[in-house]
Image: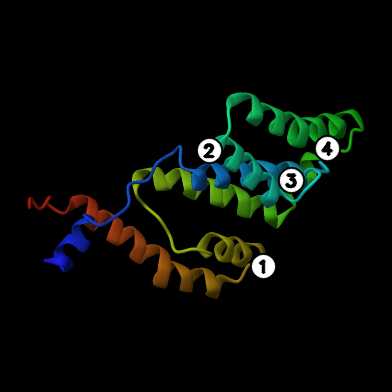
């Protein structure tokens, strides 16, 4: 019975777009892309994203506006004024592609599809160094089985208790 419940997704946690983890992932992606473009933030992207998601979940509207303006908007404005913002830097950075991949898969997670932690980073790194063996290995051992499992779980008949 427990095995059938697992296959049908009865024990699966429902993804919530307003969850702190999702907000954190999107914020890290956004900040990493700007950092790769030449923006100098007061902290690392992950630390700022944690501050933003914590403030958003625990404080009011004005607190989050203050954090965003002070920690994110001013550094971006300064980079624009100094003309140190480089879009070439964005697309040449592996970190940017990892951030975009994480944001993409965080969005796909809205459908209930998830990959094991670290898969996106490994895939982007393998693509950046053109390690075709690693890419094929990840497709066969991680990505394709996750997609098949997701499709089977979505198409499984609901079990009434």
Q: Counting residues from the N terminus, which is met first, the one under dot 3 or under dot 2?
A: 2
Disc 1 vs disc 4: which is toward the camera? 4
Q: Counting residues from the N terminus, which is met first, the one under dot 2 or under dot 1?
A: 2
Q: Counting residues from the N terminus, which is met first, the one under dot 1 or under dot 4?
A: 4
At 89% across and 28% down in the image, what residue appears?
A: 81
Residue 90 circle label: 3
What is the C-alpha distance between the residues marked 3 and 2? 30 Å
Task: Assign a secondary structure to mark 2.
Answer: helix
Disc 3 vs disc 2: which is toward the camera? 2
Q: Would residue 104 be found to the left or right of residue 39 on screen?
A: left
Nearer to me, 20 or 118: 20
Q: Are marks 1 and 4 in contact (CB under 8 Å)?
A: no
Q: Residues within 10 Å of mark 1 (few under 14, many from 20)?
A: few
Disc 2 vs disc 1: which is toward the camera? 2
What is the C-alpha distance between the residues marked 1 and 4? 26 Å
Q: Are marks 4 and 3 in contact (CB under 8 Å)?
A: no
> Residue 31 appears at what percent x and percent y?
69, 43
Residue 129 circle label: 1
Q: Which residue is mark 2?
A: 57
Q: Are marks 3 and 2 in contact (CB under 8 Å)?
A: no
What is the C-alpha distance between the residues marked 4 and 2? 31 Å
Q: Which residue is mark 4?
A: 85
Say above or below: 4 vs 91. Answer: below
What is the C-alpha distance between the residues marked 2 and 1? 38 Å
> Residue 94 appears at what percent x and percent y?
69, 57
Q: How is the image coloured?
A: rainbow
* Image quadrant where residue 10 sits: bottom left
What is the C-alpha distance between the residues marked 4 and 3? 9 Å
Q: Counting residues from the N terminus, which is met first, the one under dot 4 or under dot 3?
A: 4
At 53% across and 75% down in the image, what residue appears?
A: 133
């Amino acid at each position: 019975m427990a095995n059938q419940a697992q296959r049908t997704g009865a024990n699966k946690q429902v993804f919530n777009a307003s969850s702190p983890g999702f907000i954190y992932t999107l914020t890290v992606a956004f900040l990493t892309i700007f950092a790769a473009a030449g923006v100098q933030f007061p902290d690392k992207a992950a630390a700022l994203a944690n501050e933003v998601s914590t403030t958003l979940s625990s404080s009011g509207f004005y607190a989050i506006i203050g954090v965003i303006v002070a920690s994110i908007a001013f550094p971006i404005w300064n980079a624009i004024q100094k003309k140190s913002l480089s879009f070439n830097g964005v697309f040449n950075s592996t970190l940017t592609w990892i951030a975009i991949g994480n944001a993409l898969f965080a969005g796909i997670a809205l459908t209930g599809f998830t990959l094991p932690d670290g898969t996106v980073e490994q895939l982007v790194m393998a693509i950046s160094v053109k390690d075709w063996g690693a890419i094929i290995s990840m497709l066969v051992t991680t990505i394709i089985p996750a997609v098949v499992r997701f499709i089977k779980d979505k198409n499984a008949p609901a079990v009434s208790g």
